[in-house]
Image (tube, rainbow, N blue to C red):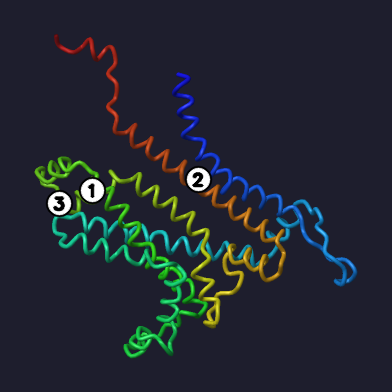
């Protein structure tokens, strides 16, 4: 027993050391930094001093309309992006897993390749495709009578969602496809023998069997959506779009830190965003856990009572 304990300690120690160094310490430093602010004395001509302000930075962030509106932007982004991503990735994975699919390796690679492009490069590519004076796509749309301004207040959110879908659709499709490939083929063959159609097999057998993968992708997508930063930042730089420097909470924290040099406010905004992500992750985990428990209890056979056993013929 002692040998097992030593082995477990030896194997887990590097993980906890790395976790503490890259997660616990930075988060603790951000919380500590959020409790202070720098003030200048002498009407701005004197030096700066760090002053403990308690929760004032959190109050300032929550009282700032730009910061609160950033969460509204994230809400609209999640409501549009997450369903499209999950439905698109799952649909493509089901198509590749179907018996009619051909050249699966080619399409897997082709769909995954956009994820290999760095986010900044992808955003720059799409900025080019969104610019009316440069984009052949916009020119073709105008020629067809479809006028749409990707940089307008109404078009900014769909533009960002489109970039994110292009980056992450193939990646999540690969996850779903791997889960589908792990399904016991005998289950699918039995359903086919019983006369189930391809649609019935896909949505009544395959999708329920990969529910854990759906929950995992959904959870990671929610966390990633709350960290939206790169795509709107590129759209904000010299494109004339409706994206402001405080369009999302991450951009608000970035602007507070590097444009206004208010590191306490930036840290407070970051901590509030991290708490929001933690609460949403907890809620999604509990919800999926309850659904799994309900499905397992519904699928389990009811126990036979002692009376029922007595009434069974010998």
- Distance between mark 3 and mark 2 Cα atoms: 36 Å
Question: How packed is label 1: few (under 14 Cα within 10 Å), some, or many (20 or more)?
Answer: few
Q: How far apart, in angstroms, are the residues tagged by discs 2 and 1?
A: 29 Å
Q: Which residue is mark 3?
A: 197
Point 58% across, 43% down: residue: 20
Q: Position of residue 142 (x, y in %)?
A: 36, 88
Does 251 sit left or right of 146 as displayed? right
Q: Which mark is residue 283?
A: 2
Q: Earlier in the sequence, mark 1 or mark 3?
A: 1
Q: Position of residue 36 (x, y in %)?
A: 76, 55
For residue 126, what is the image quadrant?
Answer: bottom left
Mark 1 element type: helix
Quadrant assignment, res 237: bottom right
Q: Residue visible at 15% across and 40% down? A: 186
Which residue is identified by label 1?
Answer: 181
**Sooner in the amino-acid sequence: mark 3 or mark 2:** 3
Q: Please state which of residues 34 and 299 is positioned toward the viewer in this rendering.
A: 34
């Amino acid at each position: 027993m002692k040998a097992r304990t030593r082995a477990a300690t030896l194997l887990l120690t590097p993980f906890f050391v790395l976790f503490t160094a890259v997660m616990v310490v930075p988060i603790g430093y951000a919380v500590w930094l959020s409790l202070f602010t720098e003030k200048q004395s002498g009407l701005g001509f004197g030096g700066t001093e760090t002053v403990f302000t308690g929760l004032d930075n959190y109050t300032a962030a929550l009282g700032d309309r730009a910061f609160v509106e950033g969460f509204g932007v994230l809400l609209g982004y999640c409501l549009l992006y997450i369903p499209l991503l999950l439905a698109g990735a799952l649909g493509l994975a089901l198509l590749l897993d179907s018996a009619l699919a051909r050249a699966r390796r080619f399409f897997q690679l082709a769909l995954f390749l956009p994820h290999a492009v760095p986010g900044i490069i992808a955003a720059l590519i799409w900025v080019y495709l969104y610019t009316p004076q440069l984009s052949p796509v916009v020119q073709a749309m105008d020629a067809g009578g479809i006028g749409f301004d990707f940089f307008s207040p109404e078009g900014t959110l769909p533009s960002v969602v489109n970039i994110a879908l292009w980056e992450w659709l193939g990646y999540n499709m690969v996850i779903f496809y791997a889960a589908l490939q792990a399904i016991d083929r005998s289950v699918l063959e039995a359903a086919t023998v019983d006369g189930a159609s391809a649609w019935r097999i896909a949505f009544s057998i395959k999708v329920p069997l990969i529910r854990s993968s759906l929950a995992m992708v959904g959870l990671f997508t929610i966390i990633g959506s709350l960290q939206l930063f790169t795509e709107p930042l590129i759209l904000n730089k010299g494109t004339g779009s409706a994206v402001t420097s405080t369009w999302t909470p991450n951009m608000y924290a970035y602007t507070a830190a590097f444009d206004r040099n208010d590191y306490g406010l930036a840290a407070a905004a970051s901590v509030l965003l991290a708490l929001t992500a933690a609460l949403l992750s907890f809620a999604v985990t509990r919800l999926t856990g309850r659904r799994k428990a309900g499905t397992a209890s519904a699928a389990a056979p009811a126990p036979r009572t002692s009376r029922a056993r007595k009434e069974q013929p010998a």
